Amino acid sequence: MSRQDFDSNLILVKDVMTRVIISVNNDTTVFQVAKMMEQSGIGAVLVKKNSDLCGIITDRDYATKIVAHNLSSDTLVEQIMSSPLITINFDESISAAAERMTNKKIRKLAVTDNGNVIGLITSTDLVTQLAK
């Protein structure tokens, strides 16, 4: 496919999403999550309460919520997570994903299949696809 042939409406979320899901309980500390993110080389962790996914904490949250408000490292993730979790269905186009991210002013979307989260798609995934 050449650049002239690129059509973001034909490429689906499932084609570029990350299928690895890392989640923590809502009573995990922000320090514990930061260590997980560092060791795993990831920028987001999903948050669950009673085994249901209820939010997300991202590397950006550390700057805008923790550092900016001088919160301690033992702050629970439920206090700073973004909730509700914003999602997109796996069979939607990456163009729809980009539009949702733009409208919501976010960089990561949970990907669902029949209401179950099966992965994540990030703005980096979209840029990487565009650069091919």
Image (cartoon, grey):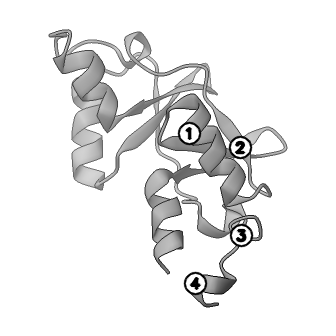
Residue 119 image label? none
Q: Residue at x 54, y 60 (%)?
A: 18
Q: Compare marks 1 and 4 and give the one earlier in the sequence.
A: 4
For the residue pair 119 and 107, the one nearer the viewer reads as 107
What residue is pinned by disc 1? 102
111 over 4 or under it: above or below: above
Q: CA distance from mark 1 to mark 3?
A: 18 Å
Determine the secondary structure under disc 1.
helix
What residue is pinned by disc 4? 3
Determine the secondary structure under disc 4.
helix
Q: Compare marks 4 and 3 and give the one earlier in the sequence.
A: 4
Determine the secondary structure under disc 3.
loop
Q: Compare marks 1 and 3 and give the one earlier in the sequence.
A: 3
Quarter the N terminus occupies: bottom right
Q: Compare marks 2 and 1 and give the one earlier in the sequence.
A: 2
Three-letter residue code for mark 3: Ile
Residue that sits furthest to the front in the current view: 4
Q: Nearer the viewer, mark 3 or mark 2?
A: 3
Determine the secondary structure under disc 2.
strand
56 over 18 or under it: above or below: above
**Looking at the picture, how far across and down is residue 100, in whole percent?**
64, 39
Q: CA distance from mark 1 to mark 4?
A: 23 Å
Q: CA distance from mark 3 to mark 2?
A: 14 Å
Three-letter residue code for mark 4: Arg
Residue 88 image label? 2
Q: Nearer the viewer, mark 4 or mark 3?
A: 4
Label 3, residues with CA under 10 Å away: few <14, some 14-19, many ≥20: some
Q: Compare marks 3 and 2 and give the one earlier in the sequence.
A: 3
Three-letter residue code for mark 1: Thr
106 over 111 or under it: above or below: above
What residue is pinned by disc 3? 11
